[in-house]
Image: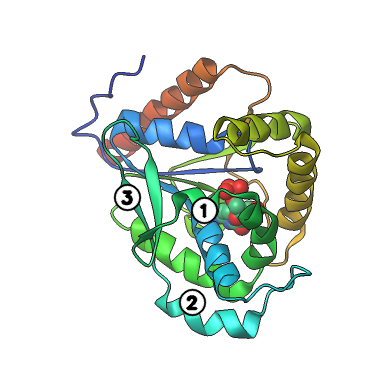
Amino acid sequence: MNEPLEITDAPKIVVAIDGYSSSGKSTMARELAKRVGYVYVDSGAMYRAVTLFALRNGLINEDGLVNKEGLIPHLHNLEVSFEQKTGKDGVQHTLLNGEDVEKEIREMRVSSHVSPVAVIPEVRERMVQLQQLMGKKKGIVMDGRDIGTTVFPNAELKVFVYAGLHERARRRWRELANKGMDIRFEEVYSNLEERDRIDTTREVSPLIKAEDAIELDNGAVTHEEQMEWLIKLFQDTIERIENESRS
Ligand code: DC
């Protein structure tokens, strides 16, 4: 089941996986990329890294207001990249100007300020620019909110992932607890609820399903079923493209 797929000669495609916070889309995207030998990009981590930069530089005040004028001039110098760790900790780490910030960007301090940072059009413009560069050579799986609508509107495969708020909060709370973070379930629940509200109602690139995205209700299936479904979808897409290029 977890064997890499034999797709060396196949055309490379772009896979866009969008959906709500903690819907399980990152796990799916990461696993698909690993199976098919593609690059994986967690675009949410990029918005989190910018938020961390703003917090560290005093650009978010106690009431959560972001100092846009202070942040915008720094954007063109901000580099967010990823490093694949080897060995026991074989996960991807997010780098902010070369510094490993993977642990810090997952903390509640960042989670509770990221949505107001992600609504700033200039922030989105810079992140989209970096994301499009990463996908230039294709062979990429990227997850986020606007990947199939704004970043890669021509992606060959688009998936939109749903899951109920309670289920997502449970998943997120367990994840944080497993990392040793002491946090109440209610806090995680209301943070997700608020982020859903901001993500779906913001003016620039709100979270919506791309017309040609295929939906998955992630609350209704097991992880194995989910992956089987996604891999089949990936293989069908490659086959379709191969057939199209032959005809
Ligand atoms: O996927 P995540 O929860 O780590 O994302 C963090 C925040 O970043 C989320 O609240 C909305 C924002 N985001 C976005 O606006 N656009 C993306 N493509 C990815 C994330």
Please indicate whether residue 233 sits to the left or right of residue 65 in the image. Answer: left
How far, Cα to Cα, is label 2 from label 3? 21 Å
Judging by the rendered image, the residue that carries numbered circle 3 is 83
Against 100, residue 193 (above or below) is above
Secondary structure type for disc 1: helix
Against 135, residue 193 (above or below) is above
How far, Cα to Cα, is label 1 from label 2? 20 Å
Q: Quarter of the image holding residue 236?
A: top left
Q: Give the residue at x 75% y 48%.
A: 191
Q: Quarter of the image holding residue 33?
A: top left
Residue 79: image x %, image y %? Answer: 39, 68
Q: Which amino acid does label 1 sit on?
A: Glu
Q: Can residue 237 be seen in this view?
A: no
Which residue is at the front of the view, 104 or 113? 104
Mark 2 and 3 residues: CB-CB less than 8 Å, in contact? no
Residue 104: image x %, image y %? Answer: 52, 53
Judging by the rendered image, the residue that carries numbered circle 1 is 104
Q: What residue type is labelled 2?
A: Leu
Please indicate whether residue 31 sits to the left or right of residue 119 in the image. Answer: left
Q: Give the residue at x 70% y 39%.
A: 183
Q: What residue type is labelled 3?
A: Glu
Secondary structure type for disc 3: strand
> What's the mark number on residue 75?
2
